[in-house]
Amino acid sequence: MQANLRDIAELYQDGPVPSGWIPAGQVLIFDWGCTIWSLVDFADPAGGMWCTHDGEHWSQGITLVEWLAGTVAGTLELEELLETQPASQID
């Protein structure tokens, strides 16, 4: 996947959710495809990771360091990410 920084900047401005809202301090860092994004919360000293999917937004329960380690090790996969979505938010 190739990133287009202009597209990421536009998406940040418009927001990945239907409301066009991204919480202050959160930055889109990875597009998983199919309306699924990972965001890092730079307002949180721990760098908590968040996810958006189909207009929903929730904490992944891991930090940026854990997210990066899992990504580099190849142990962080899309299915695992979606398992963090609260049951009340799954279609």
Image: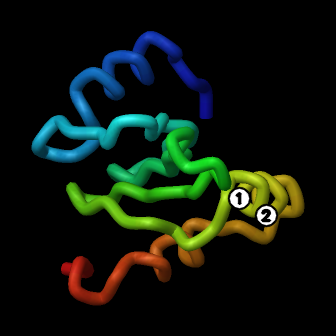
| Residue behind mark 2 | 70
Residue 42: image location, x then y, percent: 56, 39
In front here: 56 or 59? 59
Residue at x 32%, y 42% (from the top left corner): 23
* Whether label 1 touches label 2, CB < 8 Å: yes
Residue at x 71%, y 67% (from the top left corner): 76
Which residue type carries mark 1?
Answer: Trp
In front here: 32 or 67? 67
Q: Is residue 80 above or below residue 65?
A: below
| Residue behind mark 1 | 67
Residue 3: image location, x then y, percent: 57, 24
Residue at x 51%, y 17% (from the top left corner): 4
Quadrant location, the N terminus: top right
Q: Is residue 9 left or right of residue 38?
A: left
Residue at x 31%, y 60% (from the top left corner): 57
Quadrant location, the C terminus: bottom left
